[in-house]
Amino acid sequence: MDEPELHEPHDRKKAKRRSVLKRLTVVNAVFIVAIIALAGISISLFGLMNHYYDAKYRAQYELVTSLADSMDTAARNGITYMVKADDQDYERIGSAVYAHTRILWAQDAANAIYVMYPRESKESNAFFSLNGAIGSLEHVVAGYLSKLQNALQHNETYVSNATVNALLSNATLEISTLKDLLVAGIDQSRDWYKSPYSLVKRMDLAAITSASTQLMDTSHELRELFGYFG
């Protein structure tokens, strides 16, 4: 049987309100489901973001400690001994090779930290400067190694002059300063693996940039001298 028509205005109003309430109920239900879904996605994304930063900061710890150690050992166990005229030629060549290798490792680590941050940020600028300074020093050590090897091939001994030795001594001091600035980012009170944190945020980035510029200048002086000392 057909549904009876609603003739009374009051009945029509009641039916209209029921229809509106029904539509609102459906809309509210959809809205609630969407909110719950978005909340779940947000929680998931927050967890992923935390995992990302934890992984980033663990990697950063490894890179910073490797960078600091590579620079320190390149200076103390490499550059310091490659200039010692009292050591055997093959020992000095070995020291130069060691210094060169460690400097290359340091350069890779500095570059890896540099690309962790947006370009032109204070973090990327500091490590871009450091990377450039290390690269310039690498050319110096490679040039010194070449002179040692060429001298050995001619049964001669290469001994650098006082000016070069003084500049190389300055370079080792500047490397030591940079190493100290890098390790200052380590929080000795925290377990870096269980509770990862940003070492870079704890560093004096302006001081790193300044010390990198000094090392770059020293390296440039040495590179200019390579064509003139014997």
Image: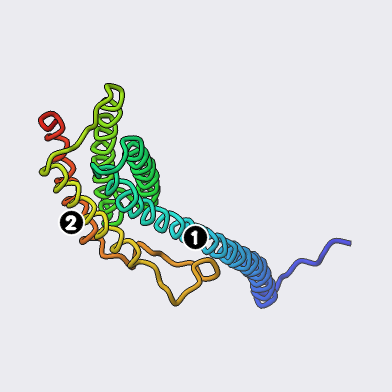
Within 10 Å of the Cα at label 2, are there few (<14), some (14-19), or many (20+) other Cα atoms? some
Which residue position holds label 1? 58
Give the farthest residue toward the top.
154
Image spot of residue 54 (x, y percent): 51, 62
The reply, left or right, for residue 147 in relation to residue 61 is: left
Examine the rendered structure and indicate whether residue 165 appears above or below residue 177. Answer: above
The reply, left or right, for residue 16 in relation to residue 52 is: right
The residue type indicated by label 1 comes to Arg
Disc 1 + disc 2, Cβ < 8 Å = no
The reply, left or right, for residue 32 in relation to residue 64 is: right
Tell me what residue is drawn at x 68 percent, y 69 percent. Answer: 22
The reply, left or right, for residue 64 in relation to residue 123 is: right
> Is 17 or 143 nearer to us in this picture?
143
The residue type indicated by label 2 comes to Ser
If you read the primary sequence from the N terminus, does the residue marked by circle 1 or circle 2 appear first? 1
Tell me what residue is drawn at x 14 percent, y 31 percent. Answer: 230
Give the farthest residue toward the right.
1
Image spot of residue 159 (x, y percent): 19, 36
Examine the rendered structure and indicate whether residue 18 appears above or below residue 90. Answer: below
Task: State the quadrant of the N terminus.
Answer: bottom right
Element carrying mark 1: helix
Image spot of residue 139 (x, y percent): 26, 36
Which corner quadrant of the image does residue 134 belong to?
top left
> Is 156 or 173 nearer to us in this picture?
156
Examine the rendered structure and indicate whether residue 16 appears above or below residue 164. Answer: below
> Is 175 or 25 nearer to us in this picture?
175
Tell me what residue is drawn at x 85 percent, y 61 percent. Answer: 2
**Marking on residue 199:** none
Tell me what residue is drawn at x 33 percent, y 67 percent. Answer: 184
Which residue position holds label 2? 210
Label 1 – label 2 distance at C-alpha: 27 Å
